[in-house]
Every structure is written in structure tokens, then in C-alpha cells.
């Protein structure tokens, strides 16, 4: 009896160990936990970092309260804006994104302005005609304005820490969730690749993107946002290589659907070119699929105001904050 | 007694379920990718050095063969250390990965040209138009070759674009190295959604590629380093290296030592700005390091001709079909 008990116990133990490793092995195919949590944690940590860097006490959150005046250094208002954004204040979230984006672009702006200034001041004025001198003076004045803007941005961004900078993408996502259309188009198009250096430190941003993108697409379509339609017709196009295409996967039927919807909302001068694209997109689709997609597009058009092509002119910038 | 067996059975089942979920929660150490890599490694490792040498010494598969037929062979040869096979594989994969997009672009161009209203009475206009039509026909022939190369290449093969390029970089392909360092996992942002582990691989391997590039006097690597360390840089390499004013100055100084005379003035201004961010003794050390490295490792070419303004590390050459 004792021997039987021992054998049963050993078998049970083996089964438990087997079940444990079976569980481990299956994780690779399991869906990941919501990435939004990881981004929220990042934003909260940065908020704490910002608060500890600032002598001011933690801000009281008042939704709809006045925003800090333009020109306020970001380091002084970061914790307050972050807390308000986290609490669902859309205006604070939008402001925070734009300030972070400004500071994220500052390095490029400094390099470009320095290069342009050097280029301009290398010109020799000897031998210039009066007309050329006037043009040159205008260029110098323009450069002065540009440098003035740069100085203001440097003052706004002074003291901004890496921890604050790294919240750019999660904050774009939060602003998008709160209805900021600029943030939505930027996040859908670029996602964590908008800040590649931070992605290297926070690979979990990819999971967040996968978790966020679908609901943002739905929100954009429900709000009649042509930018979302344009991003979708591009992402579903066979051969598209970007992040949204990677998440959605190529789908000729969906590509045709969104392209057709976009075409229905287009200005007359863009119609001919879009019709050519539509003719290409129909290749390989059945007539039943086309009829269904046409009806779908016609039906969805009712939710859109203005024209698709004026909302998304050729070469439009998806991250124009 | 039956009740006891029932209780034991229920307990055992409960333990199994618990063990299963504990296993899931701890996650697997290895994913499917590692299993595939291990299998390949095992196949290559199974060869003796002389077998490997014979394997590599055999001629590459004929250029006109479809990639799907030679994919495994090229991959095995690359894994065995065959640089030519590794280079051909990642370049062909890149072409096949972008073929759908190329199809679209060419089809659109052709449609636009054919829709043009041309003044048939003007001889010069007609000649220009004929040249353009001939261009379309030539492109069609090229596209047919591309299709015969790429038809049947599946998503699994395309998802190896990045790892194939990394392998070529490991074997000494300096174009692959520069592109991998510059873009990292963003090289295939579509695939990145399914393979977030590429980020960690990049983090772990970037430094060894940098070291290899510096040791072989690769100016492309010096340029990438100075760009990554530049304040405000937000590319993937900057995400691995972090910001460091001293290292920025070092690599900028090295780049300056190898510059053509026409670019020296501009770089000297950048150097002056970089020097202001570090202590004088640090500057002296960095100057010495740059001079020593320049004399020891960079004895051919110059920095600015190798990396002209606006160069793109990922505009890769392609072996004609």
C-alpha cells in the first residue's frame, strides 16, 4: 500500500511538472497583456520623475482648468500636464504632446539652423549689386527670426529630462484616445517608430500599439476622420511595409473598400487619378466582393463631412503637431 | 474510500491546472524563432570544418533561379560563413519584400503616361512620348524578371529579411552593417509587429558591429556614431548608446580628421560647439584618441566622400538579374 502511494505521488509530481512546462510552452502563442498598461506605467513613472525634479507639490487635478501660458518651461509644467492627461483632460494631453514634440525636434532644429546660418554667412558681400544686397539682408533678417524661435524653444525645453522625453509616444497615444485627431493619425501611422530611440528602451510599446490601434481606427471612422481612411487604404495595399500594415495584414478587399470610400469623398480634380488606382485595386476581386464593397463605401460616406482629398492633400504629414 | 479517491483526483487535477498556469505566467525562454535557428545551427554545426569549406567553395546557385528554390541553400551557406551567399540572400529578400509596392508604382506611372493627352502634331513631343513608352516597356521586362525571382516567396522567407542582413553584416558586408546599425529592427517595420524580439537582438549586437566597423576603418560607422551621439538624436542606434557629449566629440573629431577640405569649415564649427560641452582635459584626451585611431585604422578613403551629405545607409546596391 505504501509502495502504491509512493508511485502515485511520483506520477502526480511528474504530471504537475509536465503541466508546468506545457504552460510555459504555450505562452509564446498566447496574446500579450494589454500594452496600454505598460505605457500608462511609463507615463506615471515619468510624472513621478517630473514631480520629484520640481519643488512644487503634486498638482491638484482639475479637468478643464486653464493651461499654463505659452512659453512656460516644460520642466515646470510637465508633472501637472501629465497628471491631467492621465486623468482624462484632453486639452492637457494635447498640449503635453506638442511641447514634448517640440523638445524632441529641438536637436534637429539646432543642427539645421546652425548649418543654414553658416551657409548664409559664408557668402561674401563684396561685389554684390544693391538688389543682391537687399535680398541678402532679407535672408539675414529671416535667419534672425528663425534663431529667435530656436532660442524660445531652447528656453521651453531647458531641463527636460530623458525620462520626460521618453513619454512622447505614450502621451501621443493618450491624446489620441482622448480625441486629438492629429495625435491619432500620428500614432496610427508611426506608433512607437515615431521615437525609435525610446522604442529600443521600451519594446513593450509595440504591444501597446497593437492594443491601441484597432480602437483608434474605430474611433476615427466613427468621427468621420478622412485621415484614418487614407491611412487604412494605404495600409491594406499589397506590399505596404509600415507598422499599421504589419498589424492589419495586406487585404485587397479592405484596400478596395477604403480606397473607394476615399474616392467617393474626393474633390473633382483628384478623381481621375483615384479612379486609376481603383481600377488597379479591382484586379483579383470578384464582382460580388466589388458590389458589397461599393455598397459599404456608399453607406459609410454619410458619416463624413468635407472632402477626403482636402483633409489629406498629397504628401500630407501624419505627425504635424 | 471512493470519496477519498475523488478528493485525490480533484486535488491532482487542481494541481495540474495550477502548474500549467504557473508555467504560462513564467513564459518560455525560447520562442519558435530560436527553435528554427537552433535547428539551422545544428545542421551547420554537424558539418566538419572541411565539409563547411567545400560547401562554401561550391558555386552559388545560378542567378536566374527563383529565390524560393535557392532560399534554403543560400541560408545554409550564409550560416556556414559564406559572405557572397549571405549578401545575395538579404538583397534578394529586400527586392522581393518591396515587389508589390514596385508593381503598384510602375502600374500607376504607366497608367498616368497612357492617359496623357499628347499633341500628335508636335514632332518633339511625340519623340519624348515614345521614349517614355519605351521606358515603360523596359521596366515591364525588368519587372517580369523580378517576378520570376520572387514568385512563391512566402511570408516566412520575407520575415527573415532582417536576420539575413544581420548575418551578412556579421560576415563583413559593410553595406549590410551600416544599414543594420542605422535602421535596426525598423528595417522591416511590418515584420517587427510579429517579431518584437528583434529589438533585443539589435540591442545586444549593435556594439559588436560598431567595434568591427571601427577596427576595419569603416567611415560609415564613424558617421553613424557621430550622428547617434549627437545631442537630440532619436534614431535606433541612439537608443542603444544613449547620449554622451564626450563620445560625440570623439567621433566627430575622428570624422573631421578624415574629411575633404571642402567640408572642413562646417565640421570645425560643429566641433567647436561640441567642445564647449566637455572639459578641456576631456577634449585633449579625445583629440589624442581620434588622432591615434585615425593613424592606426583609417588609412584609406576619406570620411566625407564615403558618407556624402544626405547619404542613406540603406540604399543598397542590387546584383542585376
Image (spheres, coloured by chain):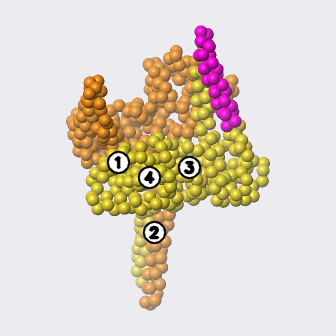
Q: Which stretch did the figure color magenta?
A: A125-153
Q: Is residue A163 above or below residue B313?
A: below
The N terminus of chain A lies in quadrant? bottom left
Q: Is residue A61 above or below residue A121?
A: below
How busy is the neighbourhood of tag 1: few (under 14 within 10 Å), some, or many (20 plus)?
some
Tell me which numbered mark, 1 or 4, is placed earlier along the sequence.
4
Q: At 51% across and 45% down in the image, what residue appears?
A: A318
User: Which dot, 3 or 4, sits closer to the camera?
Assistant: 4
What is the distance, in whole Å, between disc 3 and disc 4 at their CAs? 20 Å
Front in this rendered view, residue B3 or B308: B308
What numbered label is drawn on residue B20? 2
Report helix, strand or loop for mark 3.
helix
Q: At 33% across and 41% down in the image, what residue appears?
A: B108
Tell me which numbered mark, 3 or 4, is placed earlier along the sequence.
3
The residue beneath circle 1 is A275
What is the distance, in whole Å, between disc 2 and disc 4 at their CAs? 53 Å
Where residue B68 sits, quadrant-wise, is top left
* Residue A172 visible from this viewpoint: yes
- Kindly indicate which chain is depicted in orange in the rendered structure: B
The residue beneath circle 4 is A265
Amino acid at each position: 500500500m505504501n509502495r502504491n502511494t509512493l508511485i502515485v505521488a511520483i506520477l502526480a509530481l511528474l504530471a504537475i511538472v509536465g503541466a508546468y512546462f506545457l504552460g510555459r510552452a504555450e505562452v509564446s502563442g498566447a496574446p500579450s497583456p494589454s500594452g496600454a498598461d505598460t505605457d500608462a506605467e511609463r507615463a506615471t513613472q515619468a510624472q513621478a520623475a517630473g514631480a520629484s525634479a520640481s519643488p512644487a507639490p503634486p498638482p491638484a487635478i482639475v479637468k478643464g482648468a486653464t493651461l499654463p501660458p505659452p512659453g512656460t518651461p516644460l520642466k515646470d509644467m510637465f508633472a501637472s500636464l501629465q497628471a491631467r492627461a492621465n486623468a482624462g483632460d484632453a486639452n492637457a494631453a494635447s498640449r503635453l504632446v506638442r511641447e514634448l514634440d517640440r523638445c524632441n525636434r529641438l536637436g534637429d532644429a539646432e543642427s539645421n539652423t546652425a548649418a543654414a546660418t553658416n551657409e548664409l554667412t559664408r557668402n561674401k558681400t563684396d561685389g554684390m549689386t544693391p538688389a543682391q544686397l537687399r535680398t541678402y539682408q532679407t535672408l539675414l533678417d529671416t535667419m534672425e527670426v528663425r534663431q529667435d524661435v530656436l532660442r524660445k524653444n531652447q528656453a521651453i525645453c531647458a531641463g527636460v529630462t530623458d525620462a520626460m522625453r521618453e513619454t512622447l509616444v505614450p502621451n501621443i497615444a493618450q491624446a489620441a484616445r482622448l480625441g486629438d485627431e492629429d495625435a491619432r493619425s500620428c500614432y496610427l501611422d508611426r506608433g512607437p517608430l515615431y521615437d525609435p530611440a525610446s522604442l529600443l528602451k521600451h519594446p513593450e510599446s509595440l504591444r501597446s500599439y497593437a492594443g491601441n490601434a484597432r480602437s483608434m481606427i474605430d474611433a476615427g471612422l466613427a468621427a468621420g476622420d478622412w485621415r484614418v481612411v487614407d491611412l487604412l487604404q494605404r495600409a491594406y495595399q499589397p506590399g505596404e511595409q509600415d507598422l499599421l500594415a504589419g498589424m492589419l495584414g495586406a487585404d485587397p478587399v479592405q484596400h478596395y473598400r477604403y480606397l473607394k470610400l476615399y474616392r467617393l469623398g474626393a474633390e473633382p480634380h483628384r478623381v481621375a487619378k483615384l479612379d486609376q488606382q481603383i481600377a488597379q485595386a479591382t484586379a483579383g476581386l470578384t464582382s460580388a466582393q466589388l458590389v458589397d464593397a461599393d455598397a459599404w463605401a456608399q453607406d459609410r460616406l454619410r458619416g463624413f463631412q468635407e472632402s477626403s482629398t482636402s483633409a489629406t492633400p498629397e504628401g500630407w504629414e501624419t505627425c504635424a503637431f | 474510500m471512493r470519496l477519498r479517491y475523488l478528493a485525490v483526483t480533484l486535488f491532482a487535477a487542481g494541481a495540474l491546472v495550477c502548474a500549467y498556469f504557473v508555467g504560462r505566467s513564467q513564459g518560455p525562454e525560447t520562442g519558435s524563432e530560436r527553435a528554427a535557428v537552433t535547428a539551422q545551427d545544428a545542421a551547420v554545426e554537424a558539418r566538419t570544418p572541411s565539409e563547411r569549406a567545400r560547401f562554401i567553395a561550391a558555386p552559388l546557385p545560378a542567378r536566374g533561379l527563383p529565390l524560393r528554390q535557392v532560399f534554403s541553400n543560400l541560408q545554409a551557406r550564409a550560416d556556414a560563413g559564406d559572405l557572397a551567399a549571405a549578401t545575395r540572400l538579404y538583397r534578394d529578400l529586400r527586392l522581393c519584400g518591396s515587389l508589390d509596392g514596385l508593381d503598384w508604382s510602375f502600374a500607376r506611372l504607366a497608367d498616368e503616361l497612357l492617359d496623357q493627352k499628347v499633341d500628335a502634331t508636335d514632332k518633339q513631343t511625340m519623340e519624348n512620348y515614345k521614349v517614355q513608352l519605351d521606358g515603360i516597356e523596359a521596366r515591364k521586362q525588368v519587372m517580369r524578371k523580378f517576378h520570376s525571382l520572387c514568385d512563391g516567396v512566402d511570408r516566412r522567407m520575407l520575415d527573415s529579411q532582417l536576420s539575413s542582413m544581420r548575418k551578412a553584416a556579421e560576415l563583413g558586408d559593410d553595406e549590410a552593417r551600416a544599414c543594420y546599425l542605422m535602421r535596426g529592427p525598423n528595417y522591416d517595420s511590418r515584420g517587427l509587429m510579429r517579431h518584437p524580439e528583434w529589438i533585443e537582438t539589435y540591442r545586444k549586437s549593435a556594439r559588436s558591429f560598431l567595434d568591427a566597423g571601427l577596427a576595419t576603418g569603416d567611415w560609415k560607422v564613424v558617421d553613424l556614431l557621430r550622428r547617434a551621439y549627437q545631442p537630440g538624436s532619436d534614431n535606433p542606434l541612439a537608443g542603444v548608446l544613449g547620449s554622451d557629449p564626450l563620445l560625440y566629440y570623439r567621433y566627430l573629431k575622428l570624422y573631421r580628421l578624415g574629411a575633404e577640405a571642402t567640408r572642413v569649415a562646417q565640421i570645425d564649427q560643429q566641433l567647436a560647439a561640441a567642445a564647449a560641452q566637455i572639459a578641456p582635459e576631456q577634449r585633449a584626451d579625445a583629440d589624442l584618441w581620434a588622432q591615434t585611431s585615425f593613424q592606426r585604422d583609417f588609412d584609406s578613403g576619406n570620411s566625407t566622400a564615403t558618407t556624402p551629405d544626405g547619404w542613406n545607409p540603406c540604399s543598397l546596391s542590387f546584383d542585376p538579374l
